[in-house]
Image (tube, coloured by chain):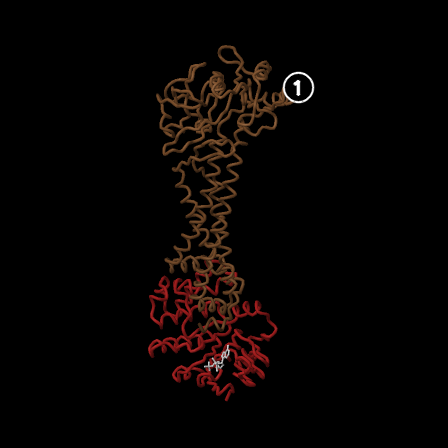
């Protein structure tokens, strides 16, 4: 079997001439300027840069939470400008898993119920949902915590529940904004190890924003942003 | 759909504000359902009197016995109708009756208008639901009276063995009767001729005619209507009493619904404030839901549903609270007959269902604006919160 026989997969993310400007009163604040970027399917890439350099803004454009002022954002073969607000919601549900800095779990729901949330947007039956939730929690090593609620868990555990929630729908792309920003060294390593598993064993495409050089080390490629310009 | 247990547990997580809101909603629903139960109670108190085989004869167009007049001759003519039943003694079961209002002292210098019915022996025979609970029937041709059960104790001398004074005469109480909780229980019964004499009223107010069967009623009503010898009309007794009740009951209903409506504004505002603060404290959660793909519409529905839960809980609480009024009895003036009536709060499944629905609708309305706000949130702003 030769490598050449494997057809080259199209890139997961393609940004072309993307810029983003926020309006603050009468002043226009440019946040991203003429960004061109390609992220291959199955890649694990990180974005670094000082605060306010536009990392989160870039991530929000890639994940379909925000729209560019100019330029084209194409993710998983889809030009996101073609989708209206509602279609974009459905698209995110189908294609993107989110990991936030502050986990964003719902405190009144158990770990299993939190993980199940994105599955409620799929046509899966209750039994199938339960199976997927169990598998995702198993993967992040929290099978023994299914019935616990976030306030009863450590920050590291909560972030692993959030990762289980991000992968439970088997999305093409996992987006992580400062996933280790609120964790101690040990918990951060556990989270990064999990990202390694998602990348190597499950062939997920991961895009991560981080301040943490240890975290960036794990990525296959690190992009630097400086005042809205990709270096 | 955002799962319902998320809403239920979020409400539970803020138990204090949740229970205060439910209490406010419940209070309004309580007023709402208690008033409807009261109107219902009035109707059944006044309308439960009456036998479908009995006809009440009034002057054409008269709305109540008080403003009606029936000549003694007319009563004799009615007694010859073929549909009229006969009593045990073979005499036709027809009674001329005279209704007057008598002011009995209530204590404290106040007086109480009491419907006083001049009756004939057939009045008792034709109304088997009227049964003596103590004492005996008045002897015809005397001033002896019997009291409806509800009147006992309402005036210092209104007891068995007491002696009432009105129209410059003495009226000894020789018995107390009940009438299946109907309007008669709020009446004083005396001899028709003696009462007519005391009040200088030669004619009757009404006549009671007992028919052989209720089936003969329709034809009898028609014959009375068309009889050229008098201008009277006949009504089945239950219809007559229902008509008497409807005026007061409708008044109470309209007043009660108006009051509930005014109060409901406050309860709706309470629900709205609670839901606004629920949305405000859960902005990050709502932002996450939107990010992972829940549509604006789902978030909107979720907040509305949560508010509806509050409303339904208030509705159930209010309805249950209203059920406790079953043990309360009220005495008031029926301004259609200007007499005192006693009644209770009578619940029906429709009232209880309506109460829960009313609470639910208040919750729904209170939730609309907070839900709109939640649905309009920018995902990025919400996630940053
Ligand atoms: N909604 C917004 N309105 C106005 N300015 C914004 C908005 N979002 C971000 N910005 C500005 O854009 C710049 C880049 O923000 P961000 O992408 O969050 O940077 P980073 O993630 O690198 O810290 C900042 O100066 C920030 O103040």
The chain assigned the colour brown in the figure is: B
Position of A222 relative to B239 (above/below): below
In this rendered view, identify the residue nearer to me: A74 or B61: B61
Position of B183 relative to B118 (above/below): below
Position of A38 relative to B343 (above/below): below
Residue at the extreme bottom of the image, as rendered = A231
Position of A42 relative to B74 (above/below): below
Q: Chain A, which colour?
A: red
In this rendered view, identify the residue nearer to me: A43 or B351: B351
**SS class, disc 1:** loop
Q: Is residue A5 shown to the viewer in this render?
A: no
In this rendered view, identify the residue nearer to me: A13 or B277: B277
Q: Quadrant of residue B145?
A: top left
In this rendered view, identify the residue nearer to me: A174 or B235: B235
**What residue would you read off at disc 1?**
B228
Q: In the rendering, at what x and y percent does residue B128 appear? A: 46, 21
- Residue displayed at 61% across by 23% down: B232
Q: Is residue A85 shown to the viewer in this render?
A: yes
């Amino acid at each position: 079997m030769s490598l050449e026989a494997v057809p080259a997969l199209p890139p997961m993310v393609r940004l072309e001439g993307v810029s983003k400007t926020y309006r603050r009163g009468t002043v226009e604040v440019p946040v991203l300027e003429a960004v061109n970027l390609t992220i291959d399917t199955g890649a694990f890439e990180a974005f670094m840069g000082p605060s306010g350099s536009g990392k989160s803004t870039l991530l929000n454009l890639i994940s379909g939470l925000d729209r560019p002022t100019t330029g084209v954002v194409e993710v998983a073969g889809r030009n996101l400008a073609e989708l209206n607000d509602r279609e974009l919601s459905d698209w995110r549900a189908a294609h993107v898993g989110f990991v936030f800095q502050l986990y964003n779990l719902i405190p009144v729901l158990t770990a299993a119920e939190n993980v199940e949330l994105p599955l409620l947007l799929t046509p899966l039956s209750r039994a199938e949902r339960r199976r997927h939730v169990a598998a995702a929690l198993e993967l992040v090593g929290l099978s023994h915590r299914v019935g616990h609620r976030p306030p009863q868990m450590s920050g590291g555990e909560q972030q692993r529940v959030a990762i289980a929630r991000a992968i439970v729908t088997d999305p093409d792309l996992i987006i992580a904004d400062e996933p280790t920003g609120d964790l101690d060294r040990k918990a951060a390593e556990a989270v990064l190890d999990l990202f390694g598993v998602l990348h190597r064993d499950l062939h997920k495409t991961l895009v991560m924003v981080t301040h943490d050089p240890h975290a960036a080390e794990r990525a296959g490629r690190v992009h630097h942003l400086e005042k809205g310009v990709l270096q | 759909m955002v799962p319902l247990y998320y809403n239920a547990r979020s409400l539970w997580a803020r138990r204090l504000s949740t229970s205060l809101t439910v209490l406010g909603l419940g209070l309004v629903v309580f007023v709402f359902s208690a008033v409807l139960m009261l109107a219902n109670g009035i109707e059944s108190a006044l309308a439960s009197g009456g036998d479908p085989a009995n006809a009440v004869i009034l002057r054409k167009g008269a709305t109540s016995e008080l403003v009606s007049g029936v000549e003694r001759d007319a009563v004799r003519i009615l007694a010859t109708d073929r549909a009229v039943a006969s009593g045990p003694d073979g005499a036709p079961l027809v009674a001329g009756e005279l209704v007057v209002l008598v002011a009995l002292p209530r204590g404290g210098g106040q007086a109480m208008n009491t419907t006083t019915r001049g009756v004939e022996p057939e009045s008792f025979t034709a109304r088997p639901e009227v049964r003596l609970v103590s004492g005996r029937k008045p002897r015809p041709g005397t001033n002896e009276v019997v009291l409806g059960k509800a009147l006992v104790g309402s005036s210092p001398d209104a007891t068995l063995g007491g002696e009432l004074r009105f129209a410059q005469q003495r009226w000894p109480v020789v018995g107390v009767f009940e009438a299946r909780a109907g309007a008669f229980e709020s009446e004083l019964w005396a001899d028709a001729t003696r009462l007519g004499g005391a009040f200088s009223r030669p004619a009757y107010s009404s006549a009671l005619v007992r028919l052989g069967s209720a089936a003969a009623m329709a034809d009898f009503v028609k014959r009375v209507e068309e009889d050229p010898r008098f201008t009277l009309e006949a009504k089945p007794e239950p219809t007559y009493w229902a008509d008497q009740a409807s005026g007061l009951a409708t008044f109470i209903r309209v007043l009660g619904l108006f009051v509930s409506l005014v109060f409901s504004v406050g309860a709706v505002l309470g629900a709205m404030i609670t839901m606004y603060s629920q949305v405000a404290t859960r902005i990050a959660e709502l932002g996450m839901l939107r990010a992972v793909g829940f549509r604006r519409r789902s978030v909107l529905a979720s907040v509305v549903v949560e508010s509806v839960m509050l409303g339904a809980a208030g509705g159930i609480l209010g309805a249950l609270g209203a059920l406790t009024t079953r043990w309360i009895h009220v005495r008031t003036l029926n301004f259609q007959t200007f007499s005192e009536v006693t009644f209770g709060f009578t619940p029906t499944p429709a009232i209880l269902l309506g109460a829960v629905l009313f609470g639910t609708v208040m919750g729904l309305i209170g939730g609309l604006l907070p839900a709109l706000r939640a649905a309009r949130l920018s995902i990025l702003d919400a996630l940053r919160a």
